[in-house]
Image: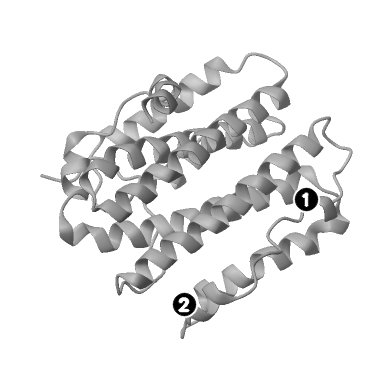
């Protein structure tokens, strides 16, 4: 685990403050933590799908992505959700890479498509895993308002291409890296089952951050360290400033 975390700590501008961890460790915070984590996994999958649709595939393939996401979106918007029926459905068809047609607008569209499809597949799986854990603990899934974290990062995205795409990929890298860091911070303070689960997520989250960063570098075709440093500072400010809502990616809790 420590070997995986070395590049994560080098990439991030700061570690999670102890004050956030102290709040997250409280038993009464486990329910909101798991609900937000569940929502974050789905949001990560949806974000990757949007990247595929906008930048990587031919328009003729869009319906395949919509069909892939539909069971998940139907579930979260159903007023009378049946968690067990959702989890018991046949989800073997959870990789559509071979059916998608890459476009010719980007030289790396096939690579972008492949990496984002794999990421989407894993995030959907993580969503189901968290949902299963919640169900076993008697915690009902519900939609909750997203915190400020991702919204504030996205507000700094440049509005012209390919800079828009580069910024979104860099932000994706920071979100995945922060998730990985927080899984590692939380794991020692959770019960054995949750600790094992969160530790198991480290490897895939670390790879997700690397995939996002590698794609940003290829799209840019030049050094992007200045832009990475820019978002490193913005991300660090969010993590180290007071945040009125407790979320998986929230900042310091109010005193």
Q: Residues within 10 Å of mark 1 (few under 14, many from 20)?
A: some
152 relative position to 98: left or right: left
Q: Where is 107 relative to 78, above or below?
A: above
Residue 67, given in percent of the width and then of the height, sits at 72, 68
Tell me the quarter of the picture where residue 10 sits.
Answer: top left
Q: Position of residue 14 (x, y in %)?
A: 32, 25
Residue 83's label in the rendered image is 2
Judging by the rendered image, the residue that carries numbered circle 1 is: 97
- How many residues crowd around disc 2 within 10 Å: few (fewer than 14), some, or many (20 or more)? some
Indicate the position of residue 45 as horizontal and vertical percent values. 58, 53
Q: Residue at x 25, y 36 (%)?
A: 241
The image shows residue 226, relative to residue 187, as above or below, that is above
> In this view of the protein, which residue sits in the foreground, 3 or 213?
3
Which residue corresponds to the image point at 65% horizontal and 64% vertical from the top-left? 69
Quarter of the image with the C terminus is top left
Could you tell me which secondary element the residue under label 1 belongs to? helix
Q: Earlier in the sequence, mark 1 or mark 2?
A: 2
- Residue 35, x across and y down, in percent: 36, 62
Question: Residue 89 lies in what quarter of the image?
Answer: bottom right
Q: CA distance from mark 1 to mark 2?
A: 27 Å
Q: Secondary structure at mark 2?
A: helix
Q: Locate the N terminus by quadrant.
A: top left
| Rendered residue at 33%/31% (across/down) | 237
Foreground: 211 or 225?
211
User: Can you name the residue that lies furthest to the bottom here?
Assistant: 80
- Give the color scheme: rainbow, by chain, secondary structure or one colour: one colour
């Amino acid at each position: 685990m420590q070997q995986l975390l070395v590049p994560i700590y080098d990439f991030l501008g700061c570690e999670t403050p102890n004050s956030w961890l102290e709040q997250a460790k409280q038993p009464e915070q486990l329910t909101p933590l798991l609900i937000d984590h569940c929502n974050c996994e789905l949001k990560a999958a949806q974000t990757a799908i949007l990247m595929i649709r906008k930048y990587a595939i031919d328009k003729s393939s869009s319906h395949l992505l919509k069909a892939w996401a539909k069971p998940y979106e139907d579930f979260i918007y159903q007023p009378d959700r049946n968690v067990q029926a959702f989890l018991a459905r046949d989800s073997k068809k959870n990789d559509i890479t071979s059916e998608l047609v890459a476009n010719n607008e980007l030289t790396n569209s096939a690579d972008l498509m492949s990496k984002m499809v794999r990421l989407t597949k894993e995030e959907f799986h993580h969503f189901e895993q968290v949902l299963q854990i919640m169900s076993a603990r008697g915690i009902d899934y519900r939609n909750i308002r997203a915190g400020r974290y991702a919204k504030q990062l996205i507000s700094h995205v440049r509005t012209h291409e390919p800079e828009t795409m580069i910024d979104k990929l860099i932000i994706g890298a920071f979100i995945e890296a922060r998730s990985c860091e927080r899984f590692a911070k939380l794991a020692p303070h959770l019960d054995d089952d949750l600790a094992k689960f969160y530790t198991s997520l480290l490897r895939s989250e670390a790879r997700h951050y690397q995939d996002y960063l590698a794609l940003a570098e290829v799209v840019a075709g030049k050094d992007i360290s200045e832009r990475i440093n820019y978002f490193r500072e913005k991300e660090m400010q969010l993590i180290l400033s007071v945040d009125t809502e407790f979320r998986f990616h929230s900042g310091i809790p109010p005193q």
